[in-house]
Amino acid sequence: MVVCILTREGGSGVSSLGVWFPQQGGAEDPLTVRESGPHGQPVRLALLGLGTVSAGVLQVLARNRAEIEHHVGGRIEVARILVRDTAKVRRVEVPSDLLTTDVNTILSDPRIAIVVELMGGVDRALSSIQAALLAGKAVVTANKDVMAEFDQEVWAAARKGGAPLYFEASVGGGVPVVRALAEGLAGNRIHRIAGILNGTTNFILSRMSAEGGSQAEALITAQLHGYAEADPSADLDGLDAARKISILSSIAYAAPCHPGQVYREGIRGITPADIEQAAHMGWTIKLLAISERAQNRVTMRVHPAFVPAQHPLAAVADAFNAVYIQGDPIGKMMLYGPGAGGEATASAVVADIVRAARWVRRGAVAPEGPVRTLVEFGSMDDVHSRFYLRLRIPDRVGVLGQIAGAFGRNGVSILSVLQTPAAGDSAELVIVTHQVREDRMQRAVVEVGTLNVVERVASVIRLAPEDL
Ligand SMILES: NC(=O)c1ccc[n+]([C@@H]2O[C@H](COP(=O)([O-])OP(=O)(O)OC[C@H]3O[C@@H](n4cnc5c(N)ncnc54)[C@H](OP(=O)(O)O)[C@@H]3O)[C@@H](O)[C@H]2O)c1
């Protein structure tokens, strides 16, 4: 049970929230907890939003209060919460006078040192983050849309306001990949990041693999479990993963990356037949977000890929996230964990709150933000991949020769061909190619599609890089 206690500071008339658990053998009175901020005061924060993640943050702050105070070296207090509707019934009980619909009561309050943006969306979130930073407040955000699309603007405000910005939860939910790349791996030259960064699509593909059934059925199950939004387009079309790989690439390569530079293909075209065929060939289909750096050229892409069943990424099931990193000197490593959900995401948000509170307590100078180096961005046309194609063809002599000819004219070399009977006089042809440049393959697919011996190009799916 979470118990929310309202404390009132003498004379100020301002309420603040101490969230705590009664302890066995006598509850600790939150009013008597030591005052321990830079001037004997708790570090005060405001939450913008009181939805899934904010509720998780309040629960984690209550449950792990002793650990958090230990890491901060003092007490943290939730002093204000911004919502749209103060009358709404909430998942966590909070004193009503902490709620406000006016962000300016937070931005203009000098007692509030940390603003935790958990509203989502872009316009209101961006303007609030910028205003908080310009007011010299530390900002914690889980907002991937803002951090992917507007990080330059946000960092400019941080520099101007002399305040720090933390955004661990914007990628990977509870998986601390932002900090791992920015600090734990800072001595590395990162060559490649290959991530399963979208829990919704991973849940759908895992479900299709484990239970059979269509993508539409798996989507409904994902929605029933709360893993998919009513409008799942940003997930299914790869936009969410594109934003996240752009954020990770910016950190890994210290480069000004943007989601618009990410080639993007979602999972809508993946059918049960492809999943079945993948399993038959010893592969699993995953939506991979890949970014690579060769010399000074960065290429980013999101697309479904066949991953060998024995690769660690193939074992990442359900709504879990994983980030597979290749660098010098680390070699290959993977971070894995829950990629969404209130409490899992709160794990990352609270870690950022602890960092922000330490900054407040020490009165330290804010980091200036990343120094960005100029890189070139490679085009998808230059990427080399192996491909899987599934074609519907008439079951008669000479068909294979014509298809092989079309591939050959475009410089595509075939690794294997498997023909199986299909309905009526048709057959299904599964072709796997050797590694080939993307633009050549796309030309070959167009030519094969126009052959009168091909009824339909049913699927074209890339294989994961050979050296992953
Ligand atoms: N949910 C996850 O698993 C997850 C994982 C990783 C990252 N994130 C990110 O975390 C952030 C929060 O996600 P969430 O799932 O917690 O969202 P949510 O459940 O939809 O909650 C959003 C909250 O923000 C408030 N809000 C929205 N717009 C507002 C506005 N203009 N003014 C005032 N309040 C406003 C809402 O107020 P009312 O309640 O009054 O409507 C609500 O309390 C998003 O950026 C999301 O992408 C979420």
Image (tube, rainbow, N blue to C red):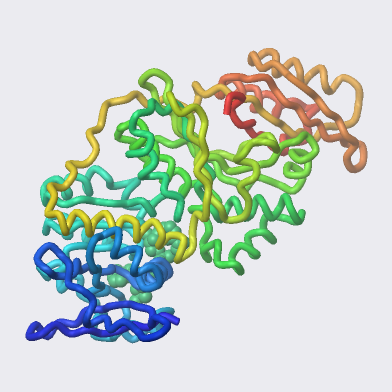
The answer to whether residue 391 is seen in the rendering is: yes
- Dividing the picture into quarters, in which one does residue 258 lie? top left
The answer to whether residue 129 is seen in the rendering is: no
Q: Quadrant of the N terminus?
A: bottom left
The residue drawn where x is 32% and y is 51% is 167
Instruction: Report whether 399 appears left or right of 384.
Output: right
The residue drawn where x is 43% and y is 79% is 91
- Dividing the picture into quarters, in which one does residue 315 lie? top right
Residue nearest the viewer, comparing 372 with 344: 344
Q: In this view, does 134 lie above or below 468?
A: below
Residue 210 image position (x, y, % from top left) = 74, 53
Instruction: Report whether 185 appears left or right of 268.
Output: left
**Outermost residue toward the left?**
11
Residue 224 image position (x, y, % from top left) = 61, 69
Q: Is residue 125 above or below residue 304?
A: below
Q: In which quarter of the image is the C terminus?
A: top right
Q: In this view, does 318 lie above or below 1?
A: above
- Ligand 1: which quarter? bottom left
Residue nearest the viewer, comparing 390 with 2: 2
Residue nearest the viewer, comparing 248 with 11: 11
Residue 369 image position (x, y, % from top left) = 21, 41
* Count of marks, rendered view: 0
Q: In this view, does 344 lie above or below 310?
A: below
The residue drawn where x is 58% and y is 52% is 201
Residue 422 image position (x, y, % from top left) = 88, 40
